[in-house]
């Protein structure tokens, strides 16, 4: 009997173990089946996205004239040389470069109509591009980036090369929607515009009316010497020549510089002012600081430090990144244009063409300016250059100026030295003039150029005429009727200020819009 009971207990335990193992086996199989179904669903989703992307790319490559839901219907046809005026071309075709465009200037800014319909609204876009070989074959497509706005500047494209590109919209919920694209061929690059071109269509910064401090630095500054129009509170700073142009070089230590003014201990910033400068940051460098007080001669008075990074600006509890620049930009050396506008407590800050900071109530009282390169080390390639520093006073709305004075004086429209080529920061005032003329359809202007007294009188006269014509043509390309504009130049014959100081010369270099 004992033997039988033992045998029965063994059989019972074995049955339980088998049952448990079977249950465990079934659970593992169910889990594997669930994981497999999930992966298959993900693959199906990915295939749908890729299929939509490839379909869009195929349309772009084949030149099909059709409407893609949520995208563009770009006009087709012979666009040989159609990219010589990007703004006008975009206005006509709804996309840039237009499909089939040739001799497209470098760098190329891709533009398309925002996907913002009742069916689909894009929060961001994925951009793809590939090279089209002479035999018609295509190299593997590369993702350019994921901008939030409907344009993107490609700075590494090759000259004399055919490309095919496409964009895909992504909604806030993660849904993808094929957009559009096209093909284009780049030019030889010899007539390429500056790295920052004039297509700052949404840039709304307008400099103050009267320049109260300006430093280029001057071409007469001696290389290797401390910049004569500045004071310092530590570190090493000197004049350097970069590509034939004088700049302020922050060498090492923790260099701080501030304008060298007789009234430096006083509050020399008015209730309404603007500050601008061009800043070069070498790849891998630290942050750059800007204080709205003179750290050597003035008390801090609660001013928050402005921090400028490779793709962001911060001030106190406010910080924002440039929407077209991801973390990879920390490894890129580049020039950037920094603009600051202060209006009775309201503080705005811009990096290149984008406003990043908008503080409605800046609690402190700005009294001066300090530029500070945080632990610069030029010897190891972690350096900074600064040029074209300008502080300007005040500002009256353009409409009020026209009604009051019959004209608008703009010293914020800038050109390359000795040329009629617009600098990109000029688009702030030009965009405001465009808005004014759009709202006031009966308004007509004579665009009039003026220079300072440096150089030959005859050359200055010709230069002023060319610059006025350039501004007029820019407005026409944006959509202002040609019969509402005319242009003329006066050279150095009508100065507003003396020509003995950098500030006086800056005030004399101007473009006026005279009501007709």
Image (cartoon, helix red, strand yellow):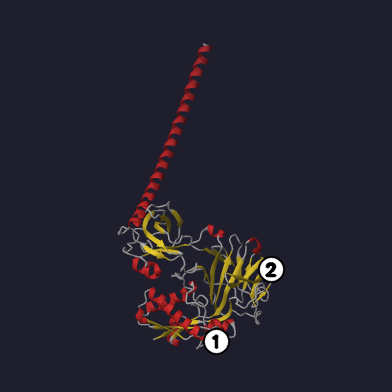
> Which residue is denoted by mark 1 in the rendering?
497
The answer to which quarter of the image holds residue 101 is: bottom left
Q: Position of residue 113 (x, y in %)?
A: 37, 64
Q: Residues within 10 Å of mark 2 (few under 14, many from 20)?
A: some
* Residue at the far right in the pictured view: 234
| Mark sitting earlier along the chain (1/2) | 2
Q: Position of residue 489 (x, y in %)?
A: 45, 84
| Residue situated in front as seen by the camera: 362 or 310 | 310
Q: Position of residue 238 (x, y in %)?
A: 66, 71
Q: Which type of secondary structure does the marked residue at label 2 adopt?
A: loop
The answer to which quarter of the image holds residue 36 is: top left
The answer to which quarter of the image holds residue 162 is: bottom left
Q: Residues within 10 Å of mark 1 (few under 14, many from 20)?
A: some
> Which residue is denoted by mark 2 in the rendering?
235
Tell me if residue 219 comes above or below residue 28 in the rendering: below
* Residue at the far bottom in the pictured view: 493
Q: Which type of secondary structure does the marked residue at label 1 adopt?
A: loop
Viewer can see residue 410: yes
Viewer can see residue 409: no
Locate residue 56 relative to residue 320 in the image: left or right: left
| Residue situated in front as seen by the camera: 50 or 138 | 138
* Residue at the far top in the pictured view: 1
- Tell me the residue at 40%/65% (across/down): 103
Q: Position of residue 260 (x, y in %)?
A: 65, 78
Tell me if residue 414 comes above or below residue 168 in the rendering: below
Q: CA distance from mark 1 to mark 2?
A: 35 Å
- Tell me the residue at 37%/67% (across/down): 81
């Amino acid at each position: 009997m004992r033997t039988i009971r033992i045998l029965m207990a063994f059989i019972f335990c074995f049955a339980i173990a088998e049952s448990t193992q079977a249950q465990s086996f079934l659970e593992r199989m169910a889990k594997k089946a669930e994981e497999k179904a999930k992966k298959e669903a993900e693959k199906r989703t990915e295939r749908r996205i890729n299929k939509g992307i490839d379909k869009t790319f195929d349309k772009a490559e084949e030149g099909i004239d059709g409407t893609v839901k949520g995208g563009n219907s770009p006009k087709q046809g012979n666009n040989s040389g159609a990219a010589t005026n990007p703004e006008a071309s975009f206005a006509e075709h709804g996309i840039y470069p237009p499909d089939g465009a040739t001799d497209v200037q470098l760098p190329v800014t891709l533009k398309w109509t925002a996907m913002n319909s009742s069916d689909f609204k894009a929060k961001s876009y994925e951009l793809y591009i590939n090279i089209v070989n002479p035999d018609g074959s295509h190299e593997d497509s590369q993702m350019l980036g994921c901008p939030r706005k409907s344009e993107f500047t490609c700075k590494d494209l090759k000259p004399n090369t055919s490309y095919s590109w496409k964009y895909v919209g992504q909604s806030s919920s993660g849904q993808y929607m094929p957009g559009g694209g096209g093909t284009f061929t780049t030019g030889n690059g010899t007539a390429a515009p500056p790295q920052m071109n004039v297509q700052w269509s949404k840039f709304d910064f307008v400099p103050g009316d009267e320049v109260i401090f300006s430093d280029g630095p001057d071409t007469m500054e001696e290389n290797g010497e401390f910049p004569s129009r500045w004071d310092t509170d530590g570190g090493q700073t000197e004049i350097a020549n970069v590509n034939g142009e004088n700049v302020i070089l922050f060498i090492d230590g923790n260099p701080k510089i501030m304008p060298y003014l007789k009234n430096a201990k006083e509050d020399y910033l008015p209730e309404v002012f603007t500050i601008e400068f061009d800043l070069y940051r070498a790849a891998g460098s630290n942050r750059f600081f800007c204080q709205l007080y003179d750290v050597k001669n003035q008390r801090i008075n609660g001013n928050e430090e402005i921090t400028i990074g490779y793709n962001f600006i911060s001030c106190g509890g406010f910080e924002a990144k440039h929407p077209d620049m991801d973390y990879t930009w920390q490894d890129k050396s580049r020039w950037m244009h920094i603009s600051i506008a202060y209006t009775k407590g309201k503080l705005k800050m811009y990096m290149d063409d984008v406003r990043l900071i908008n503080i409605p109530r800046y609690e402190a009282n700005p009294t001066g300016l300090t530029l500070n390169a945080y632990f610069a080390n030029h010897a190891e390639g972690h350096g900074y250059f600064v040029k074209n520093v300008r502080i300007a006073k005040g500002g009256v709305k353009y409409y009020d100026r026209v009604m009051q004075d019959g004209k608008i004086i703009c010293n914020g429209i800038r050109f390359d030295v000795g040329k009629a080529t617009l600098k990109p920061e000029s688009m702030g005032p030009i965009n405001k003039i465009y808005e004014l003329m759009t709202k006031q359809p009966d308004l007509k202007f004579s665009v009039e150029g003026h220079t300072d007294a440096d150089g030959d009188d005859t050359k200055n006269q010709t230069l002023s005429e060319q610059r006025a014509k350039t501004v007029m043509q820019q407005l026409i390309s944006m959509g202002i009727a040609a019969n509402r504009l005319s242009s003329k130049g006066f050279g150095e014959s009508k100065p507003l200020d003396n020509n003995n100081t950098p500030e006086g010369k800056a005030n004399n270099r101007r473009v006026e819009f005279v009501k007709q």
